[in-house]
Amino acid sequence: MCAIEVTPVVSTERLILRGPVVTDAPMIAALANDLNVTGMTTSMPHPYGPGDALAWIERAQGCDWAREALFVIEHRAFGVVGMLGFDHKRGSRAEIGYALGRPFWNRGYATEAVRAALKWVKRDWRRHVVVAGHFADNPASGQVLCKAGFLYTGDVELRPSLARGRDDVPTRMMVWLV
């Protein structure tokens, strides 16, 4: 008997969420090597180079898709535009995080990707609760999450930002319930 590992693929009208491959590394590094991108995440360093992208891809390829999911966000015309993932680093509930390259901001891609990923979570993981947070100085990410159906919990946590070199960035917490 042969066991074949298949990473999930989630498609929308404009986007494909799929497991990353090594050939994605140059584009991931180019998009993420922007402090305005990495500075809005907890765990991405700045500068962000090809080695960082390869390490992320290796982590994604080795993840247990039953508990963690790391996707590349690929636009059907433009190629890789960002990354999205779910993990359980801070508790039993899945937490979503994402980053889009600056050339692809304000086009609805983040909202489209998050909505598609949440449908996947509901269908494949059979989860009905996902948590998220956005840095208080990144209201655009809050708008993405609101449009995808997240609600504010009223909690503000101090979270790290590796790119900023801080461990105390105010983060507005949200929850998605279905």
Image: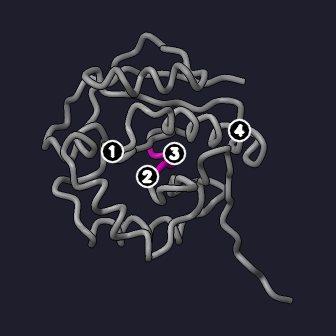
Which contiguous range is marked in magenta?
82-89
Quote the CA–CA distance across marks 4 and 3.
18 Å
Q: Nearer the viewer, residue 62 or 11?
A: 11
Q: Earlier in the sequence, mark 4 or mark 1?
A: 1
Q: Secondary structure at mark 4?
A: helix
- The type of residue carrying mark 1 is Pro
The N terminus, quarter of image: bottom right
Q: Nearer the viewer, residue 25 or 43?
A: 25
Q: Earlier in the sequence, mark 3 or mark 1?
A: 3
- The type of residue carrying mark 2 is Val
Quote the CA–CA distance across marks 4 and 2.
20 Å
Lateral position of residue 169 relative to residue 152, left or right? left
Asked if residue 85 lies in the magenta stretch, the reply is: yes
Locate residue 24: give its quadrant: bottom left
- Residue receiving disc 2: 81
Q: Are marks 4 and 1 in contact (CB under 8 Å)?
A: no
Q: Position of residue 75 (x, y in %)?
A: 53, 52
- The type of residue carrying mark 4 is Lys
Q: Which mark is residue 119?
A: 4
Lateral position of residue 72 relative to residue 3, left or right? left
Q: Which mark is residue 103?
A: 1
- Residue receiving disc 3: 88
- The type of residue carrying mark 3 is His
Asked if 155 appears above or below 41 in the picture, the reply is above
Query: Looking at the image, can residue 93 be seen?
Result: no
Farthest left residue?
Answer: 165
Q: Earlier in the sequence, mark 2 or mark 1?
A: 2
Q: Are marks 2 and 1 in contact (CB under 8 Å)?
A: yes
Q: Secondary structure at mark 3?
A: loop
